[in-house]
Image (cartoon, rainbow, N blue to C red):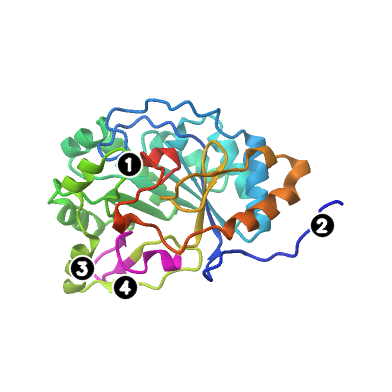
Amino acid sequence: MSLQPIPLQPLHDNHGRQFSYLRLSITDVCNFRCHYCLPNGYQGDGEPQPLSLAEIDQIVQAFAATGTRKVRITGGEPVLRRDLVEILRQVKRTQGIESVALTTNGYKLLEHIDAWYEVGLDQLNVSIDSLDPRAFQAITGHDRLQQILAGIDRGLQLGLPIKVNAVLLADQPQQLSEFLHWVKRTPVTLRFIELMETGGQPDYFARHHVSGESIKQQLLQQGWQPLTRGPHAGPAQEFAHPDYQGNIGLIMPYSRHFCSSCNRLRISAAGKLHLCLFGEHGHDLRPLMRAEHQLELQQRLRELLQLKAASHDLHQGNTGAIKHFAMIGG
């Protein structure tokens, strides 16, 4: 018996949450050596070739048909895919997708941002953990801060909404003050992300973790006001101040009720659905990423969502199967 089209009903789990946001990794390769992720650089892990353009088309169509409205392209470092422009163009053209975003370390930002904008990129996220060039190079292994900041300036000239991600690190006590000075005159959203424990670096986490709650209290004391969360927004709590052109966001996975507003799912570069960043394993969907299996793929997504847990177990030190964030795009 042939499968029949299912009336559009957003993906939902057994905990009352709906999912309209897909984080799609197109490569697990990264050219940075950030201490908290790939301190020894990308080593390769025997994974198969990343999803092809045709496979990406099929999985994005399936998610769009089941209520996804926002797709974020991630890595590794997605700019290392030579067909990134074609991927962005294809995702943007998918019926039902309203917003296409990209997360990058910014290494090739200035060279490529105009091309991304021309094919319809709606939002850009850039990872910068320090505005001190020496600290930036020490963290990433690359002396590229000024070029990355120039790329951000170009994005702002084009009118792109830009978010800058900075991982909170105990050995960077000046992070808050230097970024506050920057966002006073720079209209970006700066998001501080709590360092999260991974299976590969438990000792690093113990030495460097800083609670985002202390940053939140400092912001509130300085007159920053909470902003209302958008319908397809990620997990950040965002704040605005009348004296600042930019906003501040906090992503605090160790806070209470962090998972209650979860609206995002992840597809790895190898084609596995990850129901949680810190889940035990992924569910292989790659065999279904063909046009003749499109309806079956949609049904499989709905079935797998019923397996999603109510919360991660980070508080118990359970980091799941993830060894580093480049594996499935953070």
Cα distance between the residues tagged 1 and 3: 32 Å
- Judged left or right of residue 207, residue 148 is right
What is the CA distance from the residue labelled 4 to the residue labelled 3?
Answer: 10 Å
At a point 69% along the width and 53% down the height, the residue shown is 298
- Mark 3 highlights which residue? 219
The percent coordinates of residue 248 (x first, y second) are 29, 62
Label 1: how many residues lie within 10 Å, few (<14), some (14-19) or many (20+)? Answer: some
Tag 2 secondary structure: loop
For residue 248, side relative to residue 217 (left or right) = right
In space, the residues marked 2 and 4 are separated at their CA atoms by 45 Å
- In the image, residue 224 sits, relative to residue 267, either above or below, namely below
Of circles 2 and 4, the one toward us is 2
In 3D space, how far apart are the residues under numbered discs 2 and 1 (Cα atoms)?
42 Å
User: Residue type at mark 4?
Assistant: Pro
Nearest to viewer (mark 1 / mark 3): 1
Point out which mark residue 226 bears.
4
